[in-house]
């Protein structure tokens, strides 16, 4: 495979990023995605990277660093997508390697990724294991609770622009 670049995604590339996300069944409005990409570009702890060659985007990874109260930080890969036409050519491995480099530079001792336990994700699970990732579900349980979309009127006056902010929002 010819050499390709891995670089930060720009808000102007929201349409290409949306097309990649769509391959995994995630539909996001382009305008909304452009705003999110702008927040990522401003953040020092959250990154969206693209695999590109000659103005063609064929892979992306999103990684976020979370500081821990007691010690250090951890990173989490929140999205990894390689265009169907480029799978099996080292693109995913290169994207993960760059995410790991960013995590190490931020002082992380561990990087996590979650993947649904569904048959259509079996190839992704094999890919992560081949890169040295282990299924940590036996070691802990992950609980989650969906939060309602807050309306500005429900936020305390001191919280406007600070709850769940990224990069100075």
Image (cartoon, rainbow, N blue to C red):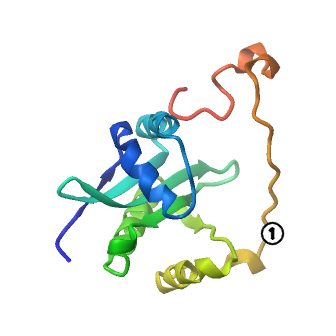
Instruction: Check disc 1: other Cα within 10 Å, few if <14, some if 14-19, many if 20+.
Output: few
Q: Nearer the viewer, residue 110 or 166?
A: 166
Q: Nearer the viewer, residue 60 or 28?
A: 28
Residue at (47, 40) in percent of width and height: 30
Residue 122, percent from left and from top: 59, 83
Name the residue at the top extreme: 157
The image quarter in which residue 143 lies: bottom right
Residue 133, percent from left and from top: 55, 79
Q: Nearer the viewer, residue 43 or 8?
A: 8
Residue 9, percent from left and from top: 36, 47
Residue at (76, 29) in percent of width and height: 150
141 relative to 56, above or below: below
Residue at (68, 77) in percent of width and height: 118
* Residue hosting label 1: 141
**Quadrant in which the C terminus appears:** top right
The image quarter in which residue 165 lies: top right
The number of discs equals: 1
Residue at (32, 77) in percent of width and height: 90
Residue 22, percent from left and from top: 50, 57
Answer with left or right where residue 57 lies relative to residue 64. left
Element marked by disc 1: loop
**Quadrant in which the N terminus appears:** bottom left
Answer with left or right where residue 95 lies relative to residue 124. left
């Amino acid at each position: 495979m010819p050499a390709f670049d891995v670089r930060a995604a720009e808000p102007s590339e929201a349409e290409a990023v949306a097309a990649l996300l769509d391959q995994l069944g995630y539909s996001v409005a382009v305008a909304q995605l452009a705003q999110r990409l702008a927040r990522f570009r401003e953040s020092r702890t959250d990154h969206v990277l693209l695999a590109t060659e000659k103005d063609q985007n064929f892979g992306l990874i999103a990684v976020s660093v979370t500081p821990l109260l007691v010690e250090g930080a951890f990173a989490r890969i929140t999205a990894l997508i390689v265009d169907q036409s480029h799978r099996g050519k080292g693109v995913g491995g290169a994207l993960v390697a760059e995410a790991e480099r960013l995590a190490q530079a931020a002082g992380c001792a561990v990087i996590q990724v979650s993947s649904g336990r569904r048959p259509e994700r079996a190839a992704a699970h094999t890919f992560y294991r081949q890169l040295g990732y282990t299924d940590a579900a036996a070691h802990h349980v992950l609980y989650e609770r969906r939060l309602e979309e807050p309306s500005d009127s429900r936020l305390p006056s001191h919280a406007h622009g600070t709850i769940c902010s990224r990069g100075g929002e």
